[in-house]
Amino acid sequence: MSSEFLKDYLPIMLFLFIALGLSFGFIILNYIFSPKKPDPEKLSAYECGFEPFNDSRMEFDVRFYLVAILFIIFDLEIAFLFPWAISLGSIGLYGYISMLIFLFILTIGFIYEWKKGALDWE
């Protein structure tokens, strides 16, 4: 019985060892062949649009935070809609009404953001 058990898990262990070996191999190759002295272009600011700053208390525009809040609102909505849609047949009317209430609250948050002008980017 022990040999059958090991024979069943041999492909999984083989796959695990190959994956770990390739992962460590790629990390070592990257360390060996990567440039050690990056040029100023590589160290320059990208994606954020401004140069790095020294003071961590620098003020940011509040619109960045409002966009982040909008993302969280819609991300949560989608994260809860998928399991709800799959289990809708078994949860019945109570589950349907509770999701409508949840979507109503999210819609109120969206309308609030819209009225505050968070969607108007200059």
Image (cartoon, rainbow, N blue to C red):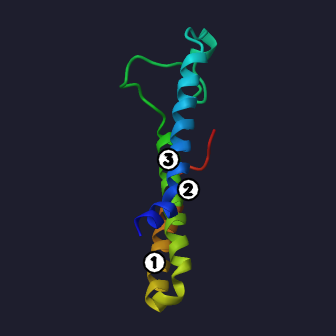
Looking at the picture, does residue 14 appear above or below residue 95? above
Q: Residues within 10 Å of mark 1 (few under 14, many from 20)?
A: few
Residue 103 is at least partly visible in this image: yes
Disc 1 marks a residue whose amino acid type is Ile
Where residue 62 appears, as percent x and y from the top left, is 47, 39
Residue marked by disc 2: 11
Q: Label 2: state its secondary structure.
A: helix
Q: Which residue does the numbered mark 3 point to in the structure image? A: 68
Q: Read off the residue under disc 1.
A: 101
* Residue found 47% across the figure and 62% down from its top: 109
Write down the quadrant of residue 31 in the picture.
top right
Q: Cα distance, mark 2 to mark 3?
A: 44 Å
Q: Residue at x 40, y 25 (%)?
A: 58
Residue type pointed to by label 3 = Ala
Give the residue type at disc 2.
Answer: Pro
Disc 3 is placed on an element classified as helix
Which of the two labelled residues, at mark 3 and mark 1, occupies the earlier sequence position? 3
Task: Confirm whether residue 112 shows in the render.
Answer: no
Q: Earlier in the sequence, mark 2 or mark 3?
A: 2
98 relative position to 120: left or right: left
> What's the CA distance linking mark 3 and mark 1?
23 Å
Asked which quadrant contains residue 121, the reply is top right
